[in-house]
Amino acid sequence: MQFSDAFIQTLTWLIPLPPLLAFALIVLVTNRSKTLSHVTAIGLMGLSWVMSWIVFYYTLSIEHFGEHVIAALSEYMRTLICKDTAYDKFVGGDKAALSEQQQRGLDVFLGKGKCSTCHAPPFFSSAMGVKGGAYFNVGVGTENVPEDKVDVGRMKVSTQATDWAAFKPPSLRNVTRSAPYFHNGSVAKLEDAVKIMAGGGIANKNKSPLLTDTGLTDAERADLIAFLGALECPGTLEEPKLP
Ligand code: HEC
């Protein structure tokens, strides 16, 4: 896409303004006009000045400028593909790609911990590859917040009461490097995020029945976290070369 498109509105809107400003200036300096007084000329200049600022801010507003920024970010994010993790190697047949602890963690993830209900491999998010996505209320952001102040999440779009405070399960690929956690960034450490999820989330009027306290031991939770390390994407994030 042409990023410069974002500025076209400014150009077309601003074209009448410089002549208006010049006209007002000439009237003021030469005082040749019989119809315009100094006061009117100064008024015109002021008006054109104010108008240029209004146009400037209007163009920068989210409806006009923002859509180009969102499109550019989406283009960039489409280039961020996470594959060839230790987990991918393991399921591809390289049994040495995961440590013993990570293999135990994988068992907990798929079995006792029931994480794969909402974070199903290979995306580690059950919302991906499903038409319309998938949204669950796990209670994050509902604790100690008056009900009318809670972020209603998916309900904002669907208007369904069943979607109240429901959010998309994010992919857990690279999760070890994506702190802070949850839609509101309320949890700083992965250990604490996993503790909340394994403990059945946070009770509220609409919590998903699919998330329950699975009674994991400390050792099982440690295995689970070690396994999440196997979802780290190889490589580093480089600033892309812009055309
Ligand atoms: C009922 C569906 C469901 C189940 C089961 C579930 N999760 Fe989640 N998980 C979610 C949703 C939804 C979010 C996003 C919540 C939010 O942002 O408010 C989430 C977020 C997370 C996050 C934070 C990721 C980030 O980038 O912010 C981690 C870590 C996580 N889950 C781990 C787990 C683990 C480990 C298990 C198993 C013990 C598990 N989840 C079970 C639905 C689920």
Image (cartoon, grey):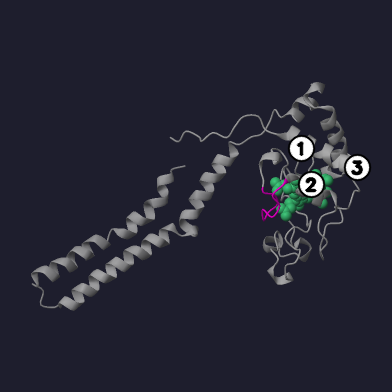
Percent of width and height locating residue 52: 32, 63
Distance between mark 1 and mark 3 Cα atoms: 16 Å
Magenta stretch bounds: 180-189
Amino acid on which the number 2 mark rests in the picture? Val
Measure how far apart labels 2 and 1 are at the Cα level. Answer: 10 Å
Residue at 82% in and 55% down: 201
Q: Which mark is residue 112?
A: 3
Q: Earlier in the sequence, mark 3 or mark 2?
A: 3
Helix, strand or loop at mark 1: helix
Q: What secondary structure characterizes most of the magenta part?
A: loop
Residue 24 in the image: state x and y as whole percent: 18, 68
The relative height of residue 23 versus residue 168 in the rendered view (above or below) is: below
Q: Which residue is mark 1?
A: 228
Residue type at mark 3 is Lys
Query: Residue 89: horizontal and vertical position, in percent?
Result: 75, 25
Residue placed most toward the observer, 222 or 32: 222
Q: Earlier in the sequence, mark 2 or mark 1?
A: 2
In the rendering, which numbered label is found on residue 194? 2
Q: Earlier in the sequence, mark 1 or mark 3?
A: 3
Residue 124 at x, y percent in the picture: 76, 40
Q: Residues within 10 Å of mark 1 (few under 14, many from 20)?
A: many
> Mark 1 is on which residue type?
Leu
CB under 8 Å between callouts 2 and 1? yes
Q: Nearer the viewer, residue 201 or 187?
A: 187
Rendered view: 226 above or below 127: above
Residue 159 magenta-highlighted: no
Mark 1 vs ligand 1: CB below 8 Å? yes
